[in-house]
Image (spheres, rainbow, N blue to C red):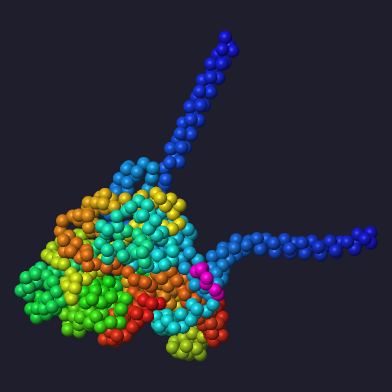
Amino acid sequence: MTSATETVPTSGRGSLIGARMREAGWGYAFVLVPMAVFGLFFIYPLVYGIYISFFEWGILGKAAGSTAGLENYQTLYHDQVFHRAMRNTFEYALLVVPLEMALGLLLALVINARIRGRAFFRSALYVPSIVSSVAITTIAIFILNPDGLLNKIIGSDQAWFGDADTALYSVVGLNAWTTAGTVMLFYLAALQSIPTDVYEAAAVDGTSRWRTFWRITFPLLKPAHFFVLVVFGIGALKVFDQFYIVSRGTGGPEYSTLSAVFYIYQEAFGSADFGVGASAGVVLFVAIFLLTLIQRATVGRAEIG
Amino acid sequence: MRRARAAVAATVVLALLTVIVAAAADARSNKATVTNITLSGWSAGKTEDDLLQSVVNDFNSTHPNIHVDYSVINGAYDVAMTARFAAHNPPDVFYVDSSLAPTWIKQGVIEPLNPYIAKSKYDTTKFYPGLLNAFKVGKNYYGFPKDWSPLAVEINKSMFAKAGIKKAPRTWAELTAAAQKLASSGAVPGGKPLCLPADWARMLAFVFQNKGSLAKVQSPAVAAAVNYYVGFFKKGLAATPTQLGVGWPGEALGKEKAAIIFEGNWLLPYMKSTFPQVGFGVGPMVKGKVNGNLGFTVSYSMAKDSKNKQAAWTLLSWLTGKVGMSKWMSLGLALPSRSDVKAVGGRAPFLAAGPSSKGWGFPNFSATLTIMNNDLQGVIDGNKTTAQMLADVNASLKG
């Protein structure tokens, strides 16, 4: 009897541990497949890319006699074209992200207001975000041509994508417009999660709309600001297709549309120098990672709702 | 009686089995003698794809021991081929653009052809040397040009008539004079006499005409040729396609925004299909101190990883031989790279450049071309000097 009373709790603990183990086992089993996919297609290429960046690496793999070293990074350090590509990329990101945020927030505020045809405007404003970037860039080339619609309206003959002084800014404008719809959706979700009682309190106090926006709405959107800043900032630093299309694969005029990813693509697939391409990729990865940490420290955490 | 019937039935079954086994063995032995190889290239349109398929069909019917599967690689050809080289699974025979040849040869993915040439006594002397050299490193051949096109002078006939110019310019002096006449007579309203791209794929021809070369790119001869080319912009006689709001010089000629351009054989079908109403003439490329031109050419080459190299050589040598190339030229889509194969009519201004053309390609091609063309735009815009550009190009060529 004693032994029986002693074994019951032991057996209860055991079954509890067993149940927890089983539960954990199921949990791991469920995440196994996605983790395997993540490991195979993200972690492994990332680690392998870092490995490649220390070698002279061609189409058929490591060059004969190549030993691990920092030669590829030295090449990047001395390569003026890479410096220009990085400068263009950061300049582009610094311009396009705030513009996307401002435009997206403005659209979200308009859509969030009780206006007629709200659903229609929400869909209409989102359309540019779902159209293929190749198609939309091609149309933009026609519109911004010296003979194009924009010049016809403003009475100019400016080659917007063909002039080194305007090409980068033209792509900034184009991409801010096409992605503003997506940014709008994130801000709209965040706006709708702000409790109405704070607005009611502000109204009771007789606070103006302008003051309400800057003192209540804008600060309460802080998680959305951070989310958009990080996600779209990373996207901007990876810009490739629009630059490639408007310059017809040249990065011109005068290197003005040469981006970091464009440089990586050219080194890897144009020059078959995968070592230099990989090292440029690592530099870009580190830059994005550091920027994200800085944004996290200064703006806040990425949570919406 | 029953035993006899059983014996007959067994004999019949045995005989049938023997026939089936023998037929299967024969089929297997027949199959074993046919070597399957693959041929790949990019698509240049359905007409060209169909023509190549019919040429391949001819090869298959005349070579019963080899079966060629022709497959088009769509999309980015260089990227797709890079992936296939890396996977050690390339087509046996494939297109190599002269601009890509130095990179792929250096990477060791193309089979040198010298042993096959020696063994089959293949005659390489019929190819235009400038085109053949685009696929040659040292004494090793890495492919034979399947066809090519040089640059020629294309003019708008009515604009020339309006300016009182009777024929397409043949020399640098005539070109300058023609451009000035076209400008002063206002023969090109809303455009420029010349449409010149900020592209060394056009300017390098002028470098060769001035006895310049990429081997000595920081030389007075190259600088003078660059200044001649850029001088047209400085004098207001030329504009880039972008400045004219077109995609390429051919479109500028078609939209009558330029009276003189320098393009290749590919312009003829484009003008016929897109701008049939525009009267244009074609003359041989202008001459500087010497004749000089660029040969835009593509080779048939063999993969180092090919598992059927002898069969691949048979195909490659047939396609680039007199018989195969003659069939390929039948529709007039391209120019023959062999002097013993005739082109269809109306290609004389292009063919004249055969002996003086050099293949378009150089070491570190992709990165160097980016520097070349971006710097050239800078020189045209006045933001860079010719000397700075040539120094950058020299460094990249050696890089």
Closer to the camera in the image, A191 or B144 = B144
Closer to the camera in the image, A111 or A147 = A147
Closer to the camera in the image, A274 or B364 = B364
**Residue B252 spot, x, y in % from top left:** 19, 71
**Residue A50 spot, x, y in % from top left:** 54, 73
**In this picture, residue B161 sits left or right of residue A40:** left
Say whether residue A172 is visible: no
**Residue drawn at x 56%, y 85% as measured from the top left:** A297
Q: Is residue B334 above or below residue B5?
A: below
For residue A64: magenta? yes
- Magenta stretch? A62-68
Q: Is residue B61 above or below residue A164?
A: above
How many discs appear? 0
Quadrant including the N terminus of chain A = bottom right
Question: Which image quadrant is residue A160 in?
Answer: bottom left
For residue A260: magenta? no
Closer to the camera in the image, A102 or A117 = A102
Q: Is residue B300 above or below residue B59?
A: below
**Residue B278 spot, x, y in % from top left:** 13, 65
Say whether residue B288 is visible: yes
**Residue drawn at x 52%, y 70% as measured from the top left:** A65
Quadrant including the C terminus of chain A = bottom right
**Residue A266 spot, x, y in % from top left:** 40, 72
**Residue drawn at x 93%, y 60% as measured from the top left:** A3
**Residue drawn at x 41%, y 42% as measured from the top left:** B34
Please, which residue is most extreme toward the left here? B164
